[in-house]
Image (cartoon, rainbow, N blue to C red):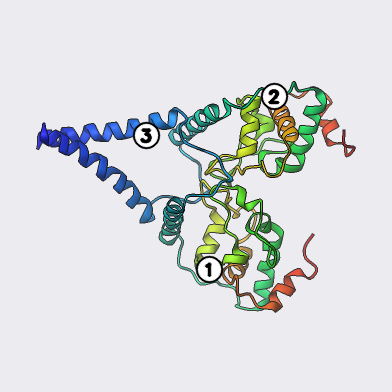
Amino acid sequence: MKNFIAGFIAGTFLLIFGVLIYLRLGLLDIRSGIPVPALTARFLYSGIHASVRRTAPKLQNPLPQTDETLIAGGKLYLNDCVGCHGEPGKPSSDFGATFYPPAPQFPIHGTNYSEAEVFWVAKHGIRRTGMAAQGSSYTDPKLWSLAAFISRFPNLPPKVLEGIQQNAPK
Amino acid sequence: MKKFALGFVAAIVVLPIGCMAYFALGFSQIRADAKPSALETSILQSVVRASVRRSAAVVPNPPAANEDAVLAGGKLYVAGCQGCHGELGGTYEQDRDHFPPVPELPHTGTQYSEPELYWIVKHGIRMTGMSAYGPFYSEKELWSLAAFLRRIEKLPPGMIEKIRTKKTG
């Protein structure tokens, strides 16, 4: 048993030092803008979603479920999110694809996050991705309208998609 | 000896599985509006530096930077970089919304060489907000940006004003 423990400790040290040496020698590829390998992607995305699921409070969207709410959120989306996450009705964002991991293209793929989870991510951001916390820029009600809008992609009513284009904010 | 080997193998198998389970079960903190610990910052920054140094070693030396190149790079910076990296001639504001925080280059400058800066702008840095700009800039533009960034915190007097004027130089 004593030998087993000694071996376990030796293995632990070797593993940690091995990883650190690999990293310190600069052997890790750090380029953005190239596709994430499928296995890595699955691991990353499920890890992120698991953490959001565990952390984000399960709240109901306090705003009325109306087209006006969706249009308000859509205008925010057009203003601040389209650069990376893609514009409704347009091809996917070239800029969003140059991040690692790339920015998800909501207008095309939608999202499997709940409204409360989208709200939480928009407010607090996701570390080690390009996703910045927006809580210092937007109030909670604005972020809730954004969450309502994003979580309805790609099945937004045509009326809403037209509404967000009208007198779009400068 | 047999037991030692068994313990050794157990560690090498169990630890990676444990790490993966930790992430897959959602125990890792992912919110970006927090400050990375000093240990994490020092490890990750040295990892990035080591990887950039190794990758950029094959980048040929830059064309000698003249004032025009620095000026052209400055204009690219104002158009494409300052939204995240800080306004030229602006006040220092600690970034609290990205994790890791975005370096405020006009105040901090950079310790990377011109070929390394060229490489970083072209390829980006994975798992930070730094995307790859290779598809958007020509080689000449990338080199002028590198020349500018190398000098960003100690630009010659009058350069910021010249960069800001609308007339393209």
Residue holding disc 3: A19
Give the tally of numbered discs. 3
Chain under numbered label 1: A
Residue B159's spot in the image, x, y percent? Answer: 82, 27
Q: Is residue A136 above or below residue B72?
A: below
Q: Most extreme residue toward the left, as rendered?
A: A1
Quadrant of the rendered image containing residue B126 = top right
Q: Judge left or right: residue A46 versus residue A1.
A: right
* Residue A157 in the figure: left or right of residue A122: right
Q: Amino acid at mark 1?
A: Glu
Of the two numbered discs 1 and 3 in the rendering, the one whose residue sits closer to the viewer = 3
As helix, strand or loop, the secondary structure at mark 2 comes to loop
Q: Residue at x 70, y 64 (%)?
A: A90
Q: Is residue B159 above or below residue A152?
A: above
The image's mark for residue A115 is 1
What kind of residue is marked 2? Pro
- Tell me the number on the disc at residue A9: none
The label number, if any, that marks residue B62 in the structure image: 2
**Same chain shared by disc 3 and disc 2:** no
Q: Which residue occupies the foreground of this view, B102 or A35?
A: A35
Can you see residue A26?
yes
Q: Quadrant of residue B1?
A: top left
Q: x and y percent of residue B89 in the render?
A: 76, 33
Say whether residue A141 is visible.
Answer: no
Q: CA distance from mark 2 to mark 1?
A: 49 Å
Circle 1 packing at 10 Å, graded few (<14), some (14-19), many (20+), is many
Please report, as a chain letter, where disc 2 is located.
B
**Residue depicted at x 46% and y 56%:** A45
Residue placed most toward the observer, B46 or A63 = B46
